[in-house]
Image (cartoon, rainbow, N blue to C red):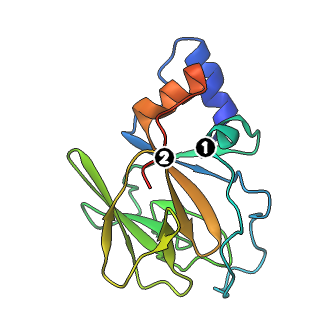
Amino acid sequence: MRPLSELRDLAAAGAVPVYAPAVLLVEFWKGASPAREFRTSTLSAPDSIPALLAVATDPQTHVVELEKSPRNPYDGFLFLGRASTCDVIIRDASISKTHAVIEPSPGRWRLRDNRSRNGTWRNGQRLKENERVELASGDVIVLGSYPIYFVLSPDLMKLLARGSMRPPRG
């Protein structure tokens, strides 16, 4: 996990700061400070989520590259949750140990809830059990009460360079 400001500085210097095909933008929501108690609790989703352009300029925003971790023994699945075996570890009380799964394949990314206690949303719609939804750059994912932006790396570079990106699908 790296601060978005670090990537902005690298991009301004002409470097390619991201090698993964997609990233998650996290920790921008002021109310989503890490929980001290890591047992899953039932919490509600945030009332409002800042626009992607605002998130891209928020100094608290961090970037997580979507890559398979050596801790994950399964091919073709990227796990999001609190467990140490997850590819993206998020320490928040509203998130289950293996909360959700992103399934990357050539030219597409799919999201599914992994029978979490507090649910998974994409663009305001709660995923049903065993439902897989296709992700588009700019989609808002909410795990429990923790909001995340899914962004394809080329769009992130455009966002950093010009401060704009095509609007999210929704």
Q: Image height check: is 15 above or below 165?
A: above
Residue 52 is labelled as 1
The numbered mark, 1 or 2, whose residue comes first in the sequence reads 1
Expressed as whole percent of the image width and height from the top left, the position of residue 64 reads: 53, 47
Question: What amino acid type should be assigned to the residue bearing mark 1?
Answer: Leu
Residue at the outermost left position: 106
Q: Which residue is mark 2?
A: 138
Report the residue at 52% width, 11% height from top. Answer: 14
Identified at 63% across, 85% down, the residue is: 40
Does residue 85 appear left or right of residue 89 in this picture? left
**111 and 122: which is toward the camera:** 122
**In this picture, residue 26 sits left or right of residue 110:** right
Label 2 CA crowd tier, 10 Å (few <14, some 14–19, many 20+): many
Q: Secondary structure at mark 2?
A: loop
* Rendering quarter of residue 101: bottom left
* Residue 99 pos. (x, y %): 48, 76
User: Which corner quadrant of the image does residue 145 belong to?
Assistant: bottom right
Residue at (56%, 28%) from the top-left corner? 164
Q: Which mark is residue 149?
A: none
Dots 1, 2 in contact, CB < 8 A: yes
